[in-house]
Amino acid sequence: VQLQASGGGLVQAGGSLRLSCAASGRTFSNNAVGWFRQAPGKEREFVAAVSWSGRNSDYAGSVKGRFTISRDNAKVYLQMNSLQSEDTAVYYCASDRRSFWSEPVYWGQGTLVTVSS
């Protein structure tokens, strides 16, 4: 499975962005998908994940209430609201082999999100 994240960009603090993750080569409709991010000088961290059906989701405490993960038949989305400078990072999507989130197996290229204060 090849994944591609898109939708990053430059946004002012308090603004919103929506990231998208698409799969190629094979569908990920039966797989859980997660979002991760890596800020400069920091380790990659978990942001959110969604089950294959979209009915189950999980969030890092730092984004809960501000970010929403969702999916349709083709893509997985990360709606990011009330963005803060601490959200500046390269965002990656990853899929699990399982239907419910356990661990990332297939990674996509990242998309850069820059939040200006």
Image (cartoon, helix red, strand yellow):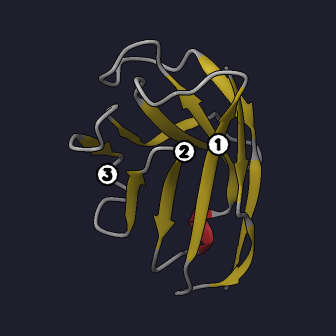
Amino acid type of the residue that numbered disc 1 sits on in the rendered structure:
Ala
Q: CA distance from mark 2 to mark 3?
A: 27 Å
Which label number is shown at residue 22? Answer: 1
Q: CA distance from mark 1 to mark 2?
A: 7 Å
Left or right: where does residue 26 sit relative to residue 63? right
Going from N to C along the chain, the mark reached first, 3 or 1, is 1
The quarter in which the C terminus is drawn is bottom right
Residue annotated with mark 2: 74
Counting from the top left corner in percent of width and height, residue 102 is at 36, 18
Q: Quadrant of residue 10?
A: bottom right
Mark 2 burial class by Cα count in 10 Å: few <14, some 14-19, many 20+: few
Mark 1 burial class by Cα count in 10 Å: few <14, some 14-19, many 20+: some
Left or right: where does residue 48 sit relative to residue 87? left
Q: CA distance from mark 3 to mark 1?
A: 25 Å
Residue located 28% across and 42% down the image? 58
Of the residues tagged 3 and 1, which is closer to the observer? 1
Looking at the rendered structure, the secondary structure element under dot 2 is: loop
Amino acid type of the residue that numbered disc 3 sits on in the rendered structure:
Gly
Residue located 51% across and 55% down the image? 77
Looking at the rendered structure, the secondary structure element under dot 3 is: loop
